[in-house]
Structure formats: C-alpha cells, structure tokens
Image (tube, coloured by chain):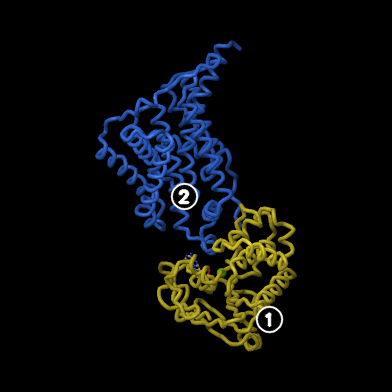
Amino acid sequence: MLEVKDLEVYYGAIHAVKGISLKVDDGQIVTLIGSNGAGKSTTLHTISGLIKPKSGSISFDGQELVGVPAHDIVGRGLVQVPEGRHVFSNMSVMENLDMGAYLRNDKDGIARDKEKVFELFPRLFERKGQMAGTLSGGEQQMLAMGRALMSRPRVLLLDEPSMGLAPLLVKEIFSIIKTINDEGTTVLLVEQNANMALSIADHAYVLETGRIVLSGTAAELAASEAVRKAYLGG
Amino acid sequence: MDSGFMHQLLQQLINGLSLGSIYALIALGYTMIYGILKLINFAHGDIYMVGAYIGYVCTTIFHLPFLPSLLIAMAGSAVVGMIIERIAYRPMRNAPRIAILITAIGVSFFLENGMILLASPQPRTFSSEFSASVYHMGGLVINSQQIIILISTVVLMLALTYIVNRTKMGKAMRAVSFDADAARLMGINIDRVIGMTFALGSALAAAGGVLVGVYYNSIDPLMGMAPGIKAFVAAVLGGIGIIPGAMVGGIILGIVEALVSGFISSTFRDAAAFAILILILLYKPQGLFGKNVREKV
Ligand SMILES: Nc1ncnc2c1ncn2[C@@H]1O[C@H](COP(=O)(O)OP(=O)(O)O)[C@@H](O)[C@H]1O
Ligand SMILES: [Mg+2]
C-alpha cells in the first residue's frame, strides 16, 4: 500500500538519503533499522511531506505523495509519531488528543476514539487533565502515539519509539505497537533498537549512510550474520 | 496625602488606561505574529494606521455609526494583513532572519508612502459627531471616548481569549506557535493558521486605530510609527509571544506614560517607554509573563 522508489533527499549540500526503495504491505509491520545518522528520520519526514525529495516517488494506494502538502498526507491516512515525541507540552493530555483529531468533525467518533486510546494507554487516562510537559518520557511517547491514533490512520509511521526509555517500558510500548497492528493499522517502524524491532516486524530494511544495505523478512535478518554483528551485539 | 494629589493620580490613571488599551490592542498582534513566525512585524503599526483610515472613510465620508465603522475597519485591515503575509512574508519563510526583518521594514515604508500617495500627507479629522461628551464624576473628568475605548478593548480581549483558548483555529494557533512541524503532522494547514493569525492581529490593531481616531480626532499616514514602537515595547514588557502579557504590558505602558506626563512632564513621556524597555531587557529579558527557559522536550 505504501511504496517508496529511488528516493533522494538533500539538506543543502548534504546527501542524506541516497536512492532508497522500500515497500510496506497492507496490515504489516515493516521496520527500518540503522544507526544514528543513517537517514531514517529523513526518510519518514519525506514520506510525511515535511521535506521535499530531490527525486524519487512515494506512492500510497497508487497515488503519488511527493508534492502533496504534509497536512493533506495526514488526511489521506498516513500519520507520523516523530522522534522525540513532540507533544504539545503547553497543552493538556486531552487537548493533545484533540489536536490529533484536528481533521475530524465527528464529535461522537472522536469521543469514542479517545476512550479507545485510554484503553490502550490507561496511564494517560489518569493524567488526562495534566499538562503534557509534566509527563515522563514514556508517558509522552504514549501520548504521541495516542494523539496520532486519533486521526484514525491506516498507516502509522513511528520514529524511534524506544528512544530514551527503560527496557521495561520499551517492552510495554512494543507490545502496544503489536496490538495496534493487530487491530488493523499498518506500521512502518524506524528503530535503532534492532532486537526489539525485529521481534515484532514482518519485514525489515537495514539503512546505512543513506542506502539500504540489506532487506528481508524480520526472521531472516534476525538470523543474518551481518545484522547480528552490526546491530544485535554479536 | 492631599486630595489634589490623589485627584491628579486618579485622573492620570484613567487617561493611562485608555492610552494603554490602544497599546495593548496593537501589542496583541505583535505578540501573536511573533509567537507563530518569530517575526517582529515592523509593519504592524502601519496596519493600525490603515485601520484608522478605513474608519475615517466609514465615519466621516459615509457617515456610518461607530460600531459598523469599527467592524468594517477591522475586516478591511484583516484582509490587508493577510495579503501582506501572503505576498511579502510567506515567500521569505525559510530565508535568514535578517532578510525577513528587512522585508518587514520595506512593507512598513510601502504602507506609509502608499497612504501618503493615496490620501496625501495631510492629517485628517474624524467627523465631529465623535467629539467628546465630558462627564464629571467627583471632580474627575471622563469623556465618552475613553469609555468607548475601554468597553471596546475589554470586549475585543474577551473575544480573543475565547478564540485562542476554545476554538479549533485558536488551538491550532497555539499548536503551530509551539511546534510548527508537529502541528503539520496533526494535519494542520499551517499556512492557513498563519494567515488567520495575521488577520486577527491586524483586526485588533485596526480597532486601536479607529479608537485613536475617535479619541484624538486626527489621523495621518505616519501615525503608526510611534505607537507601533511603543506597542512593541509593551509586547516585550509582557513577554513577547504571550497573549495576556501583551494585554498587561500595554496597560502598564499607558499608565506609566500618563503618570510621567501628568507628574513630571509630557516631554519625558516617550523616554519613559524606552526606559522601561531598557530595564526589562536588563533585568527580565523574558518579560513579566515569560518563563525563564522554554520547556520543550
Ligand atoms: N535539518 C538538517 N540539516 C542538515 N542535515 C541534516 C538535518 N537533519 C539531518 N541531517 C543529516 O542527515 C543525515 C541523516 O539524518 P537523520 O535522517 O536524522 O538520521 P537518523 O534518523 O537515521 O538518525 C545525518 O547525516 C544528519 O546529520
Ligand atoms: Mg532519527
């Protein structure tokens, strides 16, 4: 349903993404792993329309996304949870969820989806009136994910959800990603934590300095010698 | 304390409150536009001038009553503000800060000289229907214009507070000014939100322009320069980017100016504004309502 072809992205003279192609099929969890600076966030930002690529194409259900403004891409059902969460810390948890539902006008549906988010993240319910800036890192990650779900995405792009979180919390977040996927949302998951990412993904791509160097089923990559050495600590 | 002093003090507070309301109305636009674009819109004082001229045309040429004139001036200036944003600032969105600042100064010159061309540099006098009825209350002098200014300002500020805190567009404005990219990832069309911010800010400045026209009776194409700078001081005083800060900053500045002209000399009135600016920059550069560090995770 989402297909990226020969994507080239520059920041001025810096060539950050050097001809990436990848595919995400309906209902899958696809992961893009790679170390810091590999070009993972740049790829997601380009898919989301925050950055314009120099060349290449991104198609979503057969429609070209390159050139479509970021806000329209959300409207088409592709939403990103950015690296570092970027919750609106000057707004309450509830207001953050409202911002996630910005493009919707169905009051009842929004209220129902908030309840669903609270079922998925009971901790957010306890803090629904609290300013988002006062939440812990894990709670902010949950809020950023809940906020993104409020737009009823068909594809969820997650940029390093495990960043800066304690191992136990990482486990919790990943099991929630699995649940979200089981309920029908396709997921493109960007991670440095290759172990965790490969454990829930169907398909995986390995990114190194702007190029895809390996790809295959998550099981194949987890078993691959090269991946074990570079990303799985032996 | 002798009653002469108290009387003089109260009188200057009343004068300061009306003057400060005007500053506050202009300062709100400065602060909203800064909040969303990090741009000091030097042309903002000139939008206030444009508003005053539209008000002049409505009241004095077409003999419309005050309220419709005010609303037309606000709507007209809102459109002017949106056009300026669209053609002058939007293409510069990613340009270096200094280039945008110079653009803003260019827009200011354009509006001032454009109005000189259109309406001549001669000052214009608002229709005499608006000359004051003066009320004496326990020896204090309040004129009808001051009452109109205060009521209009309070109503406009309540409306603005409602829009910013309760409406979808207002929430989008807060989201964009906090984190524009995150806002885009929510599906917010930030160009539209920025355009609306210019519209709202310009409408408030225009209201200030019309009220000044009614109050002082005289307007001219360069009338926006001094109040523009002072409203900027008011916005910095309250904490630039913070809406209640602009309201309070404007009122404080107006009162200080009135007290200085009442008790010292009106020659020092303008100096007072800049003394405040210097003190604020020295001792509380984030402004009265500003937080020390912006919490952003
Ligand atoms: N805004 C930017 N301006 C210039 N260079 C950037 C910018 N963002 C990222 N880069 C560079 O692009 C490359 C890829 O960055 P990024 O996509 O953030 O990597 P990752 O998400 O995999 O850590 C890096 O070399 C980084 O320094
Ligand atoms: Mg990254």
The picture places residue B177, in percent across and down from the top left corner, at 52, 53
Q: Nearer the viewer, mark 2 or mark 1?
A: 2
Residue A199 — which label? Answer: 1
* Residue denoted by label 2: B197
* Of the pair B152 and B205, the residue shown nearer to us: B152
* Residue at 38% in and 41% down: B47
Mark 2: few/some/many CA within 10 Å (<14, 14-19, 20+):
many
- Mark 2 CB within 8 Å of ligand 1: no
- Regarding residue B275, the answer to whether it shows in the image is no
Q: Secondary structure at mark 1?
A: helix
Pointer 1 local density, CA inside 10 Å: few below 14, some 14–19, many at least 20 = few
Pick the front one: A131 or A214: A131
In the foreground, B215 or B287 = B215
* Chain in blue (letter): B
Relative to B138, B103 lies left or right:
left
Which color was chain A given? yellow
Is B259 above or below relative to A168? Answer: above
* Residue at screen point 42% across, 36% down: B229
Q: Helix, strand or loop at disc 2?
A: helix
